[in-house]
Image (cartoon, grey):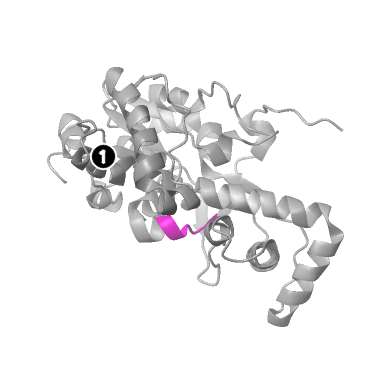
Amino acid sequence: MNKPLVISPKERIGEIPEKIFLFRSCTGSMEYPGTESAVKEVLKKLGVEVIMDADQTCCSGYILTCSGFPPEPALAVTARNLALVEQRYGLDTYMFCNGCFGYNTELAHILNHNPEYKKMSNQLISQWGYEYKNETRIIHVQELYYLLIDKIKELVIHPLNGLRVASHYGCHYLSQLYGVLDDGDLPTFHEEIYEALGGVPVFFKERRMCCGASVGRGFTHRESVVQPHLARKLDSAKEEGVELMTTVCPGCNVALDREQKNLMDRGFGPYNIPVIDLAQLIGLCIGVPVEKLGFNANTIPVDDILNRLGFGKGE
């Protein structure tokens, strides 16, 4: 049966959940802990309880991408993490990292459509008391924001006042074959959120270009492949007057934020485009205290944006 490519957030999620399980991101925890904090604080404001569990492990996607091990261990890791959510909480599993979302979605698909892989994984994780049954859905938290866009708009107390904001949706989300909230060729639902926050969406030529942080390329061909690729993207954003860029993936933040200084050291740019998570932007606008949003982790400072929005430097 053919499945539709684009569906509404209502079709994707259904009723607004009272509780969700939030899947922790390794990159988020290590590089940009403010992203995780922002997601939790924004959802609290939106009336959604967030559950997390210290027994949840890394999604294993990075190691799999680097061919650190064959697919079988990654399948077992996925089965265990999702079984944990199923057995302890009975909730859907929400991701705030495109990598976690992409790997869990793909590996769960393999488990659910290949009985032998599912049996193998369950045999392995059974020694810890787990059995994966495919009872938890994998959803990206950005999809919940879009479902709640009207409520977000009602909660705005610090509007963006015309700030020129651009999106980076990320490959792992837009490359899905069906069930996405927008056409991967020209997505606009982030821009609708910007408008709800009082911002001006900026469509720049290379907005859909990958951040280049795929681990194999980022670790082995950073200077020769990733950095010129990123320079092209940032040049395009700069030409259109982008004042702020948002992501929905801490890994993309690493590339788009951290590499700006490295690019300038090599003669590209100059660049000064702050890059933050979409939850951090929503949080600013709906009254989450700035200190809970983690902007001190940014390489490109967010102070000018905070000053413009009336928060004062670093407050």
Image coordinates for residue 278, horizontal then vertical, percent:
40, 38
- Reply above or below: 29 against 196: below
Q: Is residue 26 highlighted in magenta? A: yes
Residue denoted by label 1? 263
Residue 113 picture location, percent across and down: 82, 52
Furthest toward the left, the residue is 313
Q: Residue at x 37, y 19 (%)?
A: 202
For numbered disc 1, what is the local secondary structure?
helix
The answer to whether residue 137 is seen in the rendering is no
Task: Name which residue type carries label 1.
Answer: Leu
Q: Position of residue 37 (x, y in %)?
A: 37, 54
* In the displayed structure image, the side of residue 119 where residue 91 appears, left or right: left
Quadrant where the N terminus sits is top right
In the image, taking residue 215 as reference, residue 274 lies left or right, namely left
Q: Quadrant of residue 268?
A: top left
Q: Quadrant of residue 196?
A: top left
Mark 1 residue crowding within 10 angstroms, few (<14) / some (14–19) / many (20+): some
Q: Which residues are magenta?
A: 22-27
Q: Nearer the viewer, residue 92 or 273?
A: 273
Q: Residue furthest front?
A: 224
For image coordinates 17% across by 38% down, the residue present is: 311
